[in-house]
Every structure is written in structure tokens, then in C-alpha cells.
Image (cartoon, rainbow, N blue to C red):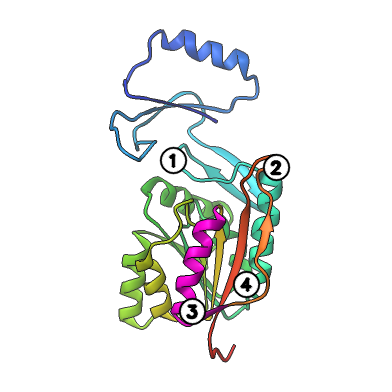
């Protein structure tokens, strides 16, 4: 998939440009124009137009199929992504009786990949297009014990806490800026037994883990690094946080 982001709704010599891109990329499946005239921190708007091919591409991860649209987050190294999510699921010590929350769920990669190992998965994601993709991916894989909600995670967590809902495991896989203090506080108030923190930025992960310690959690086992981006300074990490005085 190639997405052209522009502040103009039409391209100059659009047919010619499309033909050049297709000639240069014979394996191209999807060519999208994303019209994003706003000058803010959001790179992609919700305004997509298919210039050639399909509106989405498909990949297989840990035996599950995923439709990936232009507004969807998806790891760019599929080989190591399988190792990353498999390791995160293993470290979570998942049980068939667990209720799992998948925060920053994106298109549902983590939640869908662990759904057959737990009782229930609830995904929370603020990007509407990603939620649409996640729901399509549930149907694509015939998964019936998972749901995805379009909402900002701290607000949803606060509602669950007020309703007395207590998940067993919470997965968080935030962007490089990490988690907000509000989300950490609301997570702790729900009282999950384990929090599995997948991070692409060890600096913000360390900051956030310190806040979880203040909320009554401890780091369980070593922090596991995963090299998603060879020959760069970037590293992914997996940290498992255990609720103190947990009976589990």
C-alpha cells in the first residue's frame, strides 16, 4: 500500500502519476490519496480516495488474518512483530478465564492474536477507521469473544471503573509519547492483575512504569527488548506489571 498525503484534493496529471507509480512498483496492491489540508499533529485525515487497486491490504500474523487500511497502525516488520506479540502474550501468563483489555488497540492485532487463549477481549481505540478495521478483522477470523469500542481509553477506563468492571489483563501498546498519567491512574483504579506494556520508546516506558509503581504495581521479571528496527537506535520493549498483593 502506498498512501499519498496532500493538501490538495486533486493531483496534477493524476492518471500519469498513477501509471508511473504502478510501473515503478509492480507488486503494488493499493494506491490511496489522503486529502489532509489541516496543519496539525495528525498526519492522515479520514478523507481517503482509491487511485488504484484495493482500499485495504491483507496480512497474516500468528495465524490470524488482518485487513489494513490507510488509517490503520500496523507494525512494519512482520517477522519480528510475530515474535513481539507472541512474547507479550506468553509473558502475560494468559488463562482461559481471563478478561483482557486491549488499549490503543489499532486494528486489533494484539487482542485478536490472544482471543483464542482467554475468555473475553475488549479493545479500545480512538481512531474510527481503525475500529472499523478491527471489527472487520473479527469477522474475517470468526472470533466471537471480542469486541472493539471507539473511544479514548482513559474515558472508557473511568466508566468501567465506575461500573465495577475489573479485567484480569490490560495490554497497552501506545505511540512513542507513551501513556498519560490519567490513563495510568484509571488503569490502576480498575485493578487488573497484570498490565503488559509494549513500548516503542524505552524513555517514556521507564517514565510510565515508575508511575505504575506509585499506583501499587511491581515489575514482574525482566524487561524484554525486541529489535523491530535493525541498524537503528530504536528498540521495542515488553514490561509486565503485577498488582501488589495479588492472589493470582
- Asked whether the viewer can see residue 101, the reply is no
Tell whether 115 sits left or right of 147. Answer: right
Distance in Å between CA atoms under marks 4 and 2: 26 Å
Give the residue number, with chain letter if any, for mark 3: 192
- Mark nearest the camera among 4 and 2 is 2
- Work out which quarter of the rendered image holds the C terminus and state it: bottom right
Give the residue number, with chain letter if any, for mark 1: 71
* Numbered label attached to residue 230: 2
Vertical relation: 39 (above or below) 125:
above
Tell whether 118 sits left or right of 187. Answer: right
| Range drawn in magenta | 201-218
Contact (Cβ within 8 Å) of mark 2 with mark 1: no
Give the residue number, with chain letter if any, for mark 4: 92
Distance in Å between CA atoms under marks 4 and 1: 28 Å
Vertical relation: 111 (above or below) 99:
above
- Mark nearest the camera among 2 and 1 is 2
Residue 210 is a magenta residue: yes
- Give the residue displayed 66% in from the left and 70% down from the top: 91
Where is residue 165 shown, x and y percent of the image? Answer: 39, 80
Ranked by sequence position, the earlier of labels 4 and 2 is 4
Contact (Cβ within 8 Å) of mark 1 with mark 3: no
Ranked by sequence position, the earlier of labels 3 and 4 is 4
Ranked by sequence position, the earlier of labels 2 and 1 is 1
Mark 4: give few (<14), some (14-19) or many (20+) Cα within 10 Å.
many
Amino acid at each position: 500500500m502506498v498512501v499519498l498525503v496532500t493538501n490538495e484534493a486533486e493531483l496534477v496529471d493524476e492518471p500519469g502519476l498513477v501509471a508511473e507509480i504502478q510501473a515503478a512498483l509492480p507488486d503494488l496492491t493499493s494506491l490511496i490519496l489522503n486529502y489532509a489540508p489541516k496543519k496539525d499533529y495528525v498526519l492522515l485525515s479520514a478523507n481517503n480516495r482509491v487511485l488504484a487497486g484495493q482500499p485495504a491490504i491483507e496480512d497474516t500474523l500468528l495465524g490470524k488474518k488482518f485487513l489494513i487500511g490507510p488509517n490503520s497502525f500496523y507494525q512494519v516488520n512482520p517477522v519480528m512483530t510475530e515474535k513481539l506479540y507472541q512474547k507479550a502474550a506468553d509473558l502475560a501468563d494468559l488463562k482461559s478465564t481471563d478478561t483482557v483489555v486491549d488499549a490503543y488497540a489499532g486494528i486489533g492485532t494484539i487482542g485478536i492474536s490472544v482471543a483464542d487463549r482467554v475468555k473475553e477481549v475488549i479493545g479500545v481505540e480512538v481512531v474510527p477507521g481503525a475500529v472499523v478495521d478491527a471489527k472487520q478483522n473479527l469477522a474475517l477470523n470468526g472470533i466471537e469473544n471480542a469486541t472493539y469500542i471507539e473511544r479514548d481509553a482513559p474515558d472508557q477506563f473511568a466508566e468501567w471503573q465506575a461500573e465495577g468492571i475489573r479485567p484480569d489483563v490490560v495490554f497497552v501498546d501506545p505511540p512513542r509519547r507513551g501513556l498519560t498519567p490519567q490513563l495510568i491512574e484509571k488503569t490502576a483504579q480498575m485493578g487488573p492483575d497484570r498490565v503488559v506494556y509494549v513500548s516503542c520508546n524505552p524513555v517514556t516506558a521507564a517514565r510510565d512504569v515508575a508511575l505504575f509503581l506509585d499506583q501499587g504495581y511491581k515489575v514482574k521479571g525482566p524487561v524484554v527488548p525486541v529489535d523491530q528496527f535493525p541498524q537503528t537506535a530504536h528498540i521495542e520493549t515488553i514490561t509486565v506489571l503485577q498488582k501488589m498483593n495479588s492472589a493470582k
